[in-house]
Amino acid sequence: MSGLSEDEDRGVALMLAFQAGDDQAFDHIVAEYEGLVFGTLRRLLGPSGWVEEMAQETFIRLYRVRERYSPASKLSTFLCRIAYNLALNRIRDEKRRPSGGLRVGPEGEEMVVADAGERLAPEDDADASDWAGLVERGLQELPENQRAALVFQHYDGLGLAEIGEVLGISPKAAKSLLHRARENLREYLQPYKDAEQD
Amino acid sequence: MPNKTEDWLNSALDAVPSQPAPFGFRRDLRDRLVREGLCTESIEAPAGRFHRFVSPLLSAAAALLLIAVGYQLGAGEGSHVATVIDSGGSIAEADLIDLYEMREVIDAWDLAEDAALERAFAALDETWVEELLATEEY
């Protein structure tokens, strides 16, 4: 594991201990990686109300499939892959659901969401100065694989090989995907940036 | 707004805050693991760990504090040292003030949940304890 940082080494060590039957190691894994999992899911799913349930499911899956983990991968990469697959299934379920602008949250509650493509002009958008909100909206406009590639790279610190591992593509394809993601997000945000400079 | 360099997109991405896990997430997760039969033990929240550490000690001390308090009241002495007899018959001396302060901690953490502790705390509510606390020594 010479190529791994100290934190990554710790993740591997915790996972190996968990595989060996140390149940407390799982608690440490949750404590150390819950932020990564929540952040990733929040950015993949947007403000959907499903984040907590999906985060719980991510760690449940980790518990169930712990034997499949290989120390050749960082634990963060392994967790990102689980979270991504769960998020992708959730997004696909949502797309299949006839919503008419309404989505159902984990408790069965109705959640109003903006229709794709429904976008105010920057000068009419009251939240145009809220860059966090704008970026989140822009991320949601990206295709899922582009969004995931960008989230994994920018927020989770994954390299091209690791992004490829999570998405099931080659590092070269991951690089191309990232390029398209950045260009598309830049295009989405550019009008707001221009409006701000005027 | 992010800076105006060519890399403004990275700055824009940095504007999105991280998402902390909500309070109680780990406990809920462990409860679900138990419900699904994956493990048998519930996770201990920090308060739970504290309770596990403190409770046996305080339960033993406080439950038998009744005896100690009775002894003190019966003897009518001004001493603040209580004789505590544990369930194994061992005799030890405990400072009533220490026990009283532990009760404050227990109350603050809302951990008093067994009947023995409640009875012991009720005994500690006797006015003579308050008088003792009000003395110059404390």
Image: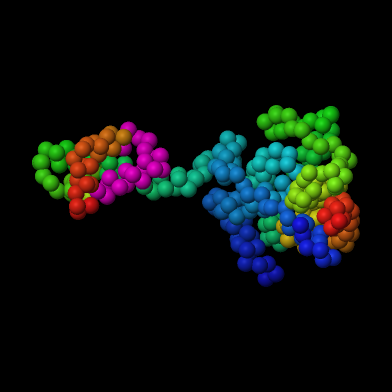
A171 falls in the magenta region: no
B100 falls in the magenta region: yes
Considering only vertical position in the picture, is A74 above or below B36? below
x and y percentages locating residue B126 in the rendered image:
22, 36
Considering only vertical position in the picture, is B120 above or below A176? above
Q: Residue at x 67, y 39 (%)?
A: A53
x and y percentages locating residue A158 in the rendered image:
75, 60
Q: Is residue A167 left or right of residue B66?
A: right
x and y percentages locating residue A104 in the rendered image:
74, 31
Could you say which is closer to the camera, residue A13 or residue B104? B104
Please provide the residue range marked out in magenta. B97-117
Q: Residue at x 19, y 52 (%)?
A: B136
Q: Is residue B77 left or right of residue A108?
A: left
Q: Residue at x 67, y 31 (%)?
A: A107
Q: Is residue B100 left or right of residue A105?
A: left
Q: Residue furthest bottom?
A: A2
